[in-house]
Amino acid sequence: MAGPRKRRAVIGAGASILAIGSALAGATGAAAARPAATHSTSGGTAYFAELANGTPNYIFPFMNLAFFSVTNIAQFQYLMFRPLYWFGQGTAPSLNLSLSVGNNPVYSNGNTKVTFSLKNYRWSNGEKVTPQDVVFWMNLMKVEKLNWAGYAPGTLPDDLKSVTTSGDSVTFTLSGPVNSYWFTYNELGQVTPLPMAWDISANGQKGGSAACGTASYQSVTVTQTKTKGGTTVTPVSPAAKSCAAVYSYMSKESGYDPSNPKAPNNSLGTYATNPLWQVVDGPWHLTAFNPDGQATFKPNPSYSGPVKAKLSSFVELPYTSAASEFNALVGGKLTVGYLPPEDVTAQAKSPTVPGPNNPRLTNFTIAPWYPWGINYFPENFNTSANGGVTAKVFHQLYFRQALQMLVDQPLYIKKLFHGYAVPTYGPVPILPPNPFASSLEKQNPYPYDPAKAVKLLASHGWNVTPNGVTTCSDASKCGVPKGAKLDFNLQYSAPTATQTTEMQAEQASFAQAGIKVNLSVASFDTVIGTAVPCSGASCTWQMENWAGGWTYSPDYYPTGEVLFQTGAGSNSGSYSDPTNDTLIKGTNFGKTSIQSWENYIVTQAPVIWQPEEAYQLTEVQKNLHGVTPQNPLMSLTPESWYFSK
Amino acid sequence: MTATADRPDPPVPEDAAASLGALPSTPTGGEVASTGGLARQLLAVFLENKLAVIGAAVIVLMVLFCFVGPIFYPVNETSTQLALLNSTQNLPPGGSNPLGTDSAGFDMLGRIMFGGQTSLEVGFAAAGIATFVGVLWGAIAGFFGGWVDALMMRFVDILLSIPLLFLVVVLAVIFHPSLSLLILVIGLTSWLVPARLIRGETLSLRVREYVQAVRVMGGTSRRIVLRHIVPNAIGTIVVNATFQVADAILLLAALGFIGLGVPAPLTDWGSMLANGVNYALDGYWWEIYPVGVAIVLVVVSFNFVGDALRDAFEVRLQRR
C-alpha cells in the first residue's frame, strides 16, 4: 500500500483527446467490467478506512502544496464539491464527461479559444452552478496563483487572455495556440466551480458581497514582480484586492492562515458545522467531522448530478497505523479497507491480478488499486543545509545517477510488495498501459548496480568509504568543495511497516557507496508540509519522502510542468533545468512529443525514483457492490456503492 | 546476619596487654575466626538470595550473548538491503535460522543480539547518568537544607508530576532520536527518584558525628558531600542504580515500541517488538515472543539483583 499521495493534473479535448482516451480505456477495459447483478438495497452505512496517518485536513478546494493530497481532494472535497471535469473511466485516467459538470470543451481559432458549457448542476442552497462560478475560480487563481499547488509558470492563468461568459457557456481566450489535449487535461482539469456563497471576506457577509466571484476576469488586475526570493503577485484593481481578501478569509475558515503559514489548523472541528461548507454541488455533504480525521457524510438531498447515493451514510475512519486498520478489518469494523503489504500472504499473479486473499479476510474481496502516478522522493536543490554544500551535491548529475543506481526496485517489488507494484524509472506512469511511456523509461537507464555507483563517485573525485561517509577529495572533479561529505537527512512518512523496511533497505543500499542517509519518521501531513519549494536560510530540508509519490491529478496528462518546471507549485525540490523547461513548453504549446521531454528527464534523475506500489490493496466486504473498478485518480464515488441482500 | 557473624566471639586472654610486646603467631586459645571484609559479607548476603544469583547469572549471560555472541554467530545484523536480497522473510524457526527471520529477512537470533547491545548500552549508560545527576542533586539539596533544599526539591516535584513517558516522547520528537541522544534523554529524565532517595539519606547523614567532626576541622561542604555523605550512601545508590538499569531498558523498549527508538540501521528490543506486533495476526510468533522474553528476563533479573543488593546493604532487611 502506498502512502497518501500528493496529486495534480489537467486535460484537453478534440480528436487527439478522444484517440488517446480510447487507447487508455481499451487498455483497461477488462478491469472496468461491471459488477455482477445483485439484489441491491438502499440504505446502510459504508465504513471506509483512511490510510494510516493520512487524514483529511483541508476543505477549501483552492490550496497550496502543503495540503495538496489525494486524501484532501479526491477522497474528501470531491464528495462535496465537484470539479469542472471528472477524470477516470473504469481504471483509465481519461476524461469522464458523464460525471463532469462541464460539457466537452470545443477548441477553435487554431487552438487559441476554448468554449465549454455547463450542465444543469445546482448548489445545495438552491443556486444554479453557473459560468460565473468558473470565473470565480479563475479570479482567485489570477490573484493567488502562487498559493495554488497546480500552478506552473507560463500555464494557467499566465496563458489566458480573457475569460468570458455567455449564457451557460464559458470561453477561455488564450495567448497562443495550445495542445488541446494538454489544455483540457492539465488546465481545465484544475478548475472547480465555486459557489457565490463563498464570495465573502468576513463573518456574517452575504454571498457575493466581496465582489470577487461576481467580478469579470478582465476587471481583476495584478502586477507580477520577480525578486531574488522568487515571484510576487500584487493585486491592483479593487476586484483583485477583493479576491485576495476572499482567499485569505476562506483559507482561514479552512484552517490555513496565509499570513502565518506555520500556525496549526484550529478549524478542523468546524468543518461539519460551518455553513460555508454545507453549500455543496456534489452527491454528499458533511454531517460530522472529528479533528482526528473521522468524517461522516450523508447524501446531498438536492444533488443534481447523474449518480444519486444509495447508501444512507458514508463514514471515513482514521487509523494511526496500518496494523490497527488491519485489526479493524479483521474485526469486521470496516466495509472497505485495505490489506497492508506486510499482511499479504501470497504473491500477486501480476501487479493487477491478485493472488489469494489473506485467509483471515474470508468475507472480503481483494482489489489492487493503482494510481495514475509515479513514485519518487525529492532532493531539495535549494537547501541551505551545510552552508549550501548539500544543495551543490544535489546539483551534480553524476551524484543523482549514482544514487538512482542504488535503488533496487525489482527487489523491493518482489520481496516487499509481493508483486503488487511496478517500477518507476521516469515521469510517466507505467500503469495502466498507455501510449505515453517511452521505451527508454521502461528500460531504466540506471539499473541497480552498487559497483557502478561506487566507480562513478570515485571517478568524480570522491573518496568512497563503503558503510562510512564518502568525502570529496578533489573539488575540481566533485564540483563541490573538498571535504564535502555525502551525509544527508531524509524524513519519511511510514504508513506501513513495509514502508519503513523499504526506507531502511534504501539506506543500507546507499551506504554501500558511503552515502550516509539519516532517517527520521514523521506523519504524512508533516512531510508534505515540509517538502515544499523554498529558498533562503530557512530552507533547510534535504530529502523528504511522503511515501506516495504523485498521482497525475489535476495534471492528468503527464507532461510534468507541475512537478518539474522551474518555479512550479509542486516542484518540491525546486528542480530547475532550462532544457527541461523548453521541452515542457514545447509539449504543451508546440509540437514536441511528450517522449522527447520524458526521455530527457529520465536521464536527468531530478528526483529519486521508487517502486510505484498499489495505492492500496482494497478489501471490499462481499455484500457491498459498486466499489470496483477503482478510479485511477484515487477519487471515491461512494454514491455508486450499494449493499446486496 | 552471616554464618560467620553467628559464631561466638573468641575468648580474650587475660594477659593480652602484657603480651603485646611479643604477640604470638597464633592467638592463645586458638584461631580467630575471620569475620571477612565488608565486600565478602555483602557477597555472602547476596548469595543467600537464590533469585538474585539467578538474576546475576542471567545478566552476565545476556551481556555475553549480546556482545560476544555475534563473534560465534556472525550474521548480517544491519543491512536491510542484504537481508532482503539473501534471505527469506518471515521464516519460522528452523534450519539455519534457529529463531526464524523477520519481515526484512534478518535472522532473529542475530538481530536479538544486535538489538540487545543497544538496549543494554542504553540501560547502563542512562542509569549511570541518572544516578550521577540524582546523587549530586539529592546530596546537595539534603546537605544544605533550607531554601536550597526547598528550591531544588520543588523542581524535582514539578518534573515528577509530568508523566515520564510523555516527557521523553516530547524530547525524542523534538530532537530526533539517536543512540547518544536517547541515552541522554532517558538519563536526564530518570534522575528524579534517586535524587529524592539520596536527599533523604543525606538528611540523616549530615547530622552524624563524623560529618560534624569534618566541619569542626574546617572541611569544606564540597569535601563533606563528596567524601563523606555520598560514600556513606553507597548502598542506596547502588541498589537504586540497579533498578535504574531495568527502568531505562523498559523505557527504551517503550520508546522503540511507539517508533521513537534508535534510528536505523540500529535497532533495540522495543523496536523489534513493535515490528513483530505488526504480524501478530499473521501468526509470526517468533517475531514477538523471543524478543519479549529477552526484555522480561533482563528487566526481572536486574530487579532481583537490586532486591538482593538492598538486603545486603541494609542490615535491618537481612534474613527477612
Image (cartoon, coloured by chain):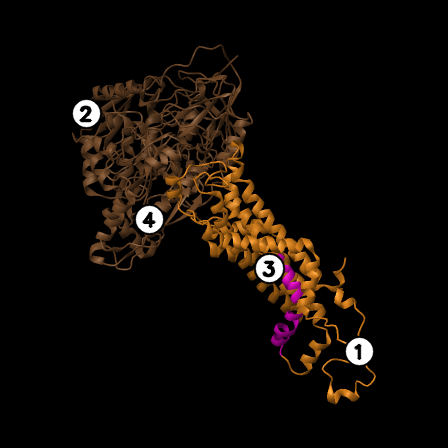
Q: Quadrant of the N terminus of chain B?
A: bottom right
Give the drawing colour for chain B: orange
Which amino acid does the dot numbered 2 rest on? Asn
* Proximity of marks 1 and 2: CB atoms separated by less than 8 Å: no
Residue A512, label in figure: 4
Circle 4 crowding by C-alpha within 10 Å: few under 14, some 14–19, many from 20:
many
Of the two numbered discs 3 and 4 in the rendering, the one whose residue sits closer to the viewer: 4
Q: CA distance from mark 1 to mark 3?
A: 53 Å
In depth, the one of B103 and A305 nearer the eye is: B103
Whether B200 is drawn above or below A395: the answer is below
First reached walking from the N terminus: tag 1 or tag 3: 1
Which amino acid does the dot numbered 3 rest on? Trp
Q: Which chain is brown?
A: A
Which SS class for mark 2?
loop
Q: CA distance from mark 3 to mark 4?
A: 41 Å
Q: Position of residue A589 (x, y in %)?
A: 19, 31
Tell whether B154 sits left or right of A625: right
Q: From the image, tell me which residue sits under label 3.
A: B191
In depth, the one of A439 and B107 nearer the eye is: B107
| Extent of the magenta region | B220-242
Q: From the image, tell me which residue sits under label 1.
A: B29
Q: Quadrant of the C terminus of chain B?
A: bottom right
Of the two numbered discs 1 and 3 in the rendering, the one whose residue sits closer to the viewer: 1
Which amino acid does the dot numbered 1 rest on? Gly
Q: CA distance from mark 1 to mark 4?
A: 77 Å
Residue A225, label in figure: none
* Chain letter of the residue carrying label 3: B
Q: Residue at image x 28%, y 59%?
A: A483
Circle 1 crowding by C-alpha within 10 Å: few under 14, some 14–19, many from 20:
few
> Can residue A602 be found in the magenta stretch?
no
